[in-house]
Image (cartoon, rainbow, N blue to C red):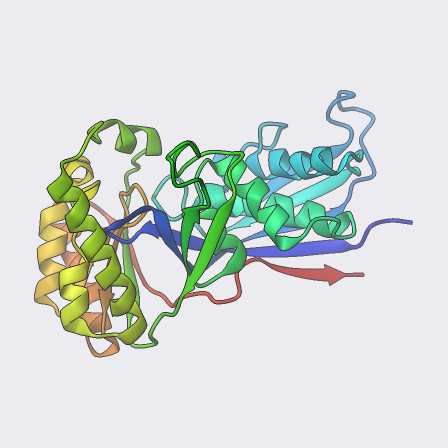
Amino acid sequence: MRSPTLTVTVPATTANLGAGFDCLGAALSLHNQFVFSHFAGDQKRSNQERSFAIEATGLEAERVATNTSNLAYQAFLKLYQQIGKTPPPVHLEIVLQVPLARGLGSSATAIVGGLVGANALAGSPLSLEQVMDLAIGLEGHPDNVVPALLGGCRLSASAGRSDGRSGGQSGAGQSWTICDIPWHEEVVPVIAIPNFELSTAAARQVLPAQYSRADAVFNVAHLGMLLRGVQTGRSDWLRTALQDRIHQPYRQTLIQGFEQVQTAALDAGAHGLVISGSGPTLLALTHPDQMVAVETAMAAAWVAQGISVQTRILEIDLAGAVVEAHS
């Protein structure tokens, strides 16, 4: 009996949100879809490739690998390896709306899409928490994959020992405590996506190996205020909270036009502006009354720098990864 066709819809994410470096992320109303169906095989293909086929459509589809290195397919295989079963022959269609390498969690959508699709096809042998742990292990840290899977705004902390021997905040093999962060409906995310890329590796290379106590205290205080700000919608709290000393002062030097876009967003009424993930996408938080003006100002500021840009007014996606079965 053939497996049913499954569509897994996974939201884009924005991580860090200023002071929430590597631990805070939110799902956005922009999605990739992963459609899994039975693959009958192709005798003209190599033995290794007769068990799957991958095609991609949509935004930048030509850049997506369609061989065994495809990240969604790697995640698909990982889940079957985890449960000790042979993966079924599968045709995977990827429908892209989330731009690649722009700081909007495109890799997280692939990891979550592959794991969730595999788990559903296998009869859901793993719990949501077990799927989440696999996703964190594949991504290396939780800030994107957790909201992509669960939806909403999520704060992640390693549930390690207080003596410091748990191995730090990032990496596989750890246990995690996840906290959902209420998001006020009048806090609107507005994104501006420039037509250049910034790799996560390059964005991490510019970060210092050590920070001062003053910078650590600054970020702890601002993260606390950020959580209250997005929960209440208070503009004065958000204007203060959307500051950071851990990653943005270093990464903004890699993003041409950052200061101009930030100034334009603030002048148009935004509460503040942050780098989405590792960039180069910039995200402003604003009140609904100012969202159109903020979007327009951010776009104009980058165009004035000779950079083409796409802008979107978005919402927080509360559903996370959604599975639909088709006969």
- Residue 286 picture quarter: bottom left
In the displayed structure, does residue 126 sit left or right of residue 29? right
How many marks can you see? 0
At x 70% / y 45%, what residue is drawn? Answer: 118
Residue 92 spot, x, y in % from top left: 67, 43
At x 9% / y 51%, what residue is drawn? Answer: 260
User: Quick one: 43 or 288, which is closer to the camera?
Assistant: 288
In the displayed structure, does residue 106 sit left or right of residue 81? left
Residue 249 spot, x, y in % from top left: 14, 41
At x 17% / y 34%, what residue is drawn? Answer: 211
Quadrant containing the C terminus is bottom right
Please say whether residue 247 is visible from this viewpoint.
yes
Judge whether 10 appears above or below 136 on screen: below
At x 52% / y 43%, what residue is drawn? Answer: 175
Please say whether residue 60 is visible from this viewpoint.
no
In the displayed structure, does residue 325 sit left or right of residue 106? right
Residue 125 spot, x, y in % from top left: 75, 49
- Residue 186 picture quarter: bottom left
- Residue 60 picture quarter: top left
User: Quick one: 91 or 152, which is closer to the camera?
Assistant: 152
Residue placed farthest to the bottom in the image?
289
Judge whether 47 appears above or below 232 on screen: above
User: Quick one: 155 or 33, which is closer to the camera?
Assistant: 155
